Image (cartoon, rainbow, N blue to C red):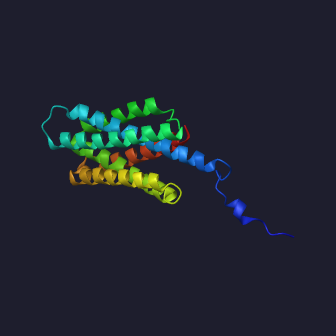
């Protein structure tokens, strides 16, 4: 009687032919969606704070500019690798803007709490992808590392600006993080 092949039982569900290409497409699609969402979050926040001569206006402008660079890089990667963007793009634009404007309407601390919550999830997400891609796609992993460092800068700036002092911070942050994690799962597949 032969022993069961335990390697088959633990094989990843996407381990067949084309699995690497499919996984790379998921990574690029979700990262593009995330950067798109980030640009629209900052646009929503900036719309509320527009015209104010406050520190946050400059911070948001700087962060949006960095996210726009990331988004442009993913636009190029999607084209080069023949990967379609998520079907959720129109919804993510609207949801990002609404989240940004909504948190900004709650005040500067809430806007910073939004940034901190989003960037915390994105940093974790990028870290996992970097570890996954480091050997087989070192150039892409290096690009993701650079983007992750920008996201960490945004998170740290938000924390230094009082993100955790926002009204109902634990609820606000956990809700936003949950929404981000759900958007990641949806964007990978759709």
Q: Is residue 5 above or below residue 117?
A: below
Q: Position of residue 24 (x, y in %)?
A: 54, 47
Q: How many marks?
A: 0
Q: Nearer the viewer, residue 110 or 29?
A: 29
Q: Nearer the viewer, residue 9 or 65?
A: 65
Q: Position of residue 35 (x, y in %)?
A: 39, 41
Residue drawn at x 32%, y 51% as measured from the top left: 150
Residue drawn at x 30%, y 52% as measured from the top left: 155
Quarter the N terminus occupies: bottom right
Q: Position of residue 62 (x, y in %)?
A: 24, 43
137 left or right of 55 in image: right
Residue furthest right as drawn: 1
Residue drawn at x 34%, y 35% as measured from the top left: 40
Q: Position of residue 161 (x, y in %)?
A: 21, 50
38 left or right of 82 in image: left
Residue drawn at x 34%, y 38% as measured from the top left: 39
Quarter the C terminus occupies: top right
Residue 7 figure quarter: bottom right
Residue furthest left as drawn: 53
- Residue 75 can be seen in this image: yes
């Amino acid at each position: 009687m032969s022993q069961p092949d335990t390697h088959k039982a633990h094989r990843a569900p996407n381990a067949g032919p084309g699995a690497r290409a499919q996984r790379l497409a998921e990574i690029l699609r979700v990262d593009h969606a995330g950067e798109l969402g980030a640009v629209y979050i900052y646009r929503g926040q900036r719309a509320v704070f527009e015209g104010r001569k406050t520190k946050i206006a400059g911070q948001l402008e700087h962060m949006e500019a960095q996210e726009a660079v990331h988004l442009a890089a993913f636009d190029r990667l999607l084209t080069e690798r023949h990967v379609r963007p998520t079907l959720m793009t129109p919804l993510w634009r609207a949801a990002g803007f609404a989240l940004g404007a909504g948190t900004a309407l709650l005040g500067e601390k809430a806007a910073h709490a939004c940034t901190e919550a989003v960037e915390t999830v994105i940093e974790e997400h990028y870290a996992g992808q970097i570890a996954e891609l480091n050997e087989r796609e070192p150039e892409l992993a290096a690009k993701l590392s650079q983007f992750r460092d920008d996201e960490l800068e945004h998170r740290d700036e938000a924390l230094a600006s009082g993100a955790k002092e926002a009204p109902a911070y634990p609820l606000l942050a956990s809700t936003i993080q949950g929404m981000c994690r759900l958007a990641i799962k949806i964007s990978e597949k759709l």
